[in-house]
Amino acid sequence: MRPRGPVWLAAPAVLVLLLVLAYPLAIVVWRSFTDPAVGFDNYVWFFQSAVNRTVLQRTFVVAAWVTLVSLICAYPYAYAMTIVGKNVRLVLILCVLVPFWLSGVVRTLAWVILLQDSGVINSILRGLGLSPVKLIRTLPGVIIGMTQVLLPFMILPIYSVMRGIDTRLLQAARSLGAKPWRAFLQIYVPLSLPGVYAGVIIVFILSLGFYITPALLGGPRSTMLSSLVQNQVLSLLNWGRGGAMGVVLLVATFVLLAIAAPLMRQKHSSTRREA
Amino acid sequence: MPSFSRVLLGLFCLLVAVLLLAPTLVVIPMSFNGNKSLAFPPDGFSWQWYQNFFTNPDWTTSFTNSLLIALIVAVVATVVGTLAAFGVTRAAGRTGGLLRAILITPMVVPGVVLAIGIYAVYLDTHLVGTVAGFVLAHTMLAIPFVLIAVQASLEVFDRRLETAASSLGANRLTVFRTVTLPLILPGLLSGALFAFITSFDEIIVALFITSPYLKTLPVQIYTSITRDADPTVAAVGTLLFLATSLIIIAGLLFGMRRGRT
């Protein structure tokens, strides 16, 4: 009784997940194969339509851009967080945590105000005598907004790994004659990689399924897969096609997770060693 | 690192910090706009959008709905998630790891896919536009956050303390109440806070299962942004920004004080 007992404490949580996660997802998969007729029609339709293929491709391209830009911003920032004094670190952490916990709708609203035709950026450009640029309802606008919204998800895992790196290793390398940059690239960067992998996979996966920011900042030429799913189900009431798109998104997410799982596990072992 | 690279790093980080925080600050001047417009720069000064938020029933009811749902979710998800954390941490062998992987899947499933599935189920079971429907869906989304927070405090928890208490004659409930609970309380409270915020901010599932009779605050903000340029959203945004910042500053200061003692 004793050794098996504790597992059952998870039963209520598992029940909630079965009711509002597993069962709903099963219905989505089921309808994608049965609505309106049994078979692969919805998938054939999805992959034969040039519009859908463009949107699918665009979703991956946007996710890749957002991941790349946030990695470039996050890596030096997370590194700086580990080398500054206590008070500066507190300010840097605050700058990450406030956007991390602030409602995504509010942060997207801010980007609408900034990027719109009568927005902050364009009024500054006009003030400088330059011609305004179209930012809202364009792909660059979507990428800028998404990067800012998702940046904390890249910084936090990288920081949590970097914090555990023993910097005496760098001093050791330098005392053995390595140039500072060489020591950094050969010792520090490889040790920080598990955090980078975790950040990259989290941001990429969240980008693939992102809905609110692209919906509010994007236009017809920057539609992402999530908006297409929403449109099929709520506007066209086409559960089969919407479901098939959803399943494509779901499969892509889990394939990526499966590929990344070994790298993530490496992260766990390294954090445990630190503890 | 040479000092030149340090200066460069400092400048770059300043830029990133500005990118993280500054864009959101733009909602503050917009919230005092004298005109009903979100165009920049704001024109004139008025408190009318704050007044509108606190008096217009569209905004007040959606705010109280969100508050009610988030409070229930915080309680339910904390109880369910804490039990699960015990199950995961104290399960034998691989079971714990597998269970944990299953229980954190809500964090990675794309929001829209989940939303259409829940919408389909709720249409059949008449849960669309009900508090129970929102609570159930948000509890599922909040469980991973509670699990992670409580598990973190359970992993550093010395189980010999429980054994000691039992050997001194305490029954299992007394051990939990007087030894285990006080020690994991910080993890439990941060889990409850995460659950509250998860529910209070949740928008994608909410957009699908909302009804004209039951809207949450994020849904009201979203529809307001898409329908008209009403600066009330900026006023709400400013209030949420201030509330979030205060909670985090309080949390950081609290953490620092505990770390020092």
Image: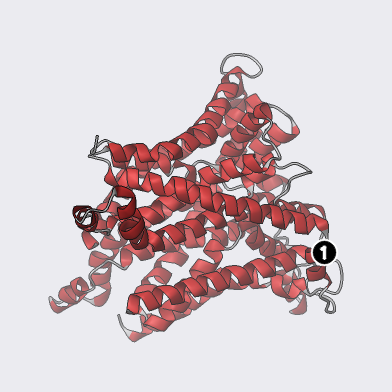
Residue under numbered circle 1: B55
Instruction: Return the residue nearer the eye: A158 or A17.
Output: A17
- Res. A58 visible in picture: no
Q: Secondary structure at mark 1?
A: helix
Q: Position of residue B56 (x, y in %)?
A: 83, 60
| Residue located farthest toward the front when viewing the structure as drawn | B169
Give the percent coordinates (x, y) of residue A73. 47, 66
B186 sits left or right of B170 in the view = right
Whether residue B115 can be seen here: yes
Q: Is B58 on the left or on the right of B130, as rendered?
A: right
Viewer-proximal residue among A114 and B127: B127
- Residue sitting at x 35%, y 63%: A160
Taking depth in this image into account, of A71 and B148 the one nearest to the observer is B148
Q: Quadrant of residue A109?
A: bottom right
Where, by quadrant of the figure, is residue A80 drawn?
bottom left
What residue do we see at 60% from left, 35% from top?
Answer: B118
- Crowd tier of the residue under label 1, counting other residues whose Cα lies within 10 Å: few below 14, some 14–19, many 20 or above: few
* Amino acid on which the number 1 mark rests in the picture: Thr
Q: Quadrant of the N terminus of chain B?
A: bottom left
Question: As drawn, which residue projects farthest toward the right?
Answer: B35
Question: Dividing the image into 4 quarters, which one contains the C terminus of chain B?
Answer: bottom left
Name the residue at 47% across, 80% down.
B11
